[in-house]
Image (tube, grey):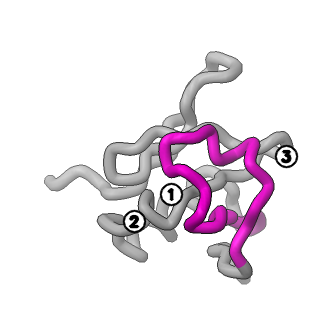
Amino acid sequence: MAQRTVRYLDSPDPGSFEWDFAGRLRRTDDNGEPVAHPDDLQHCTATDLKFALGLALGESGDLSVVDASVNPDDDVEEVGFFTPVSFGLRP
């Protein structure tokens, strides 16, 4: 079985990485929601994103995407410059 391109890493350690976007590890924002850079999503599939969001957030919550002008190597969960694009699950 192939490894998913987006994974929620259910880690009990505070401050540890919680999301893996095709190899790029990210933490959640202060509200516990995932944040990604557009570069993080280039090699991710929609089905894997849907699965990971459902696993981590249940039926509510969104994945915010920061502006592409932000350095993808920065801690994007702390940047605050978001695109109008986000991904979420709706009932």
Q: Main secondary structure of the magenta part?
A: loop
Image quadrant assignment for residue 70: bottom right
Residue 60 horizontal/vertical position (percent): 77, 66
Q: Is residue 23 above or below residue 14?
A: below
Q: Residue at x 69, y 74 (%)?
A: 83
Gap in angstroms between the C-alphas marked 1 and 2 = 6 Å
Residue range of the region highlighted in magenta in the rendering: 59-83
Q: Helix or strand or loop: what does disc 1 sit on?
A: helix
Gap in angstroms between the C-alphas marked 1 and 3 = 17 Å
Q: Residue at x 73, y 81 (%)?
A: 84
Instruction: From the viewer's perspective, tell me whether residue 50 is left or right of residue 35.
Output: left
Whether label 1 touches label 2, CB < 8 Å: yes
Q: Amino acid at mark 2?
A: Asp
Q: Which of pointers 2 and 3 lies earlier in the amino acid sequence? A: 3
Q: Residue at x 17, y 55 (%)?
A: 2
Locate the C terminus by quadrant. bottom right
Residue 10 horizontal/vertical position (percent): 55, 34
Image quadrant assignment for residue 42: bottom left
Gap in angstroms between the C-alphas marked 2 and 3 = 22 Å
- The crowd level at tag 3 (other Cα within 10 Å; few <14, some 14-19, many 20+) is few
Residue 89 horizontal/vertical position (percent): 66, 75
Q: Helix or strand or loop: what does disc 2 sit on?
A: helix
* Residue occupied by mark 2: 48
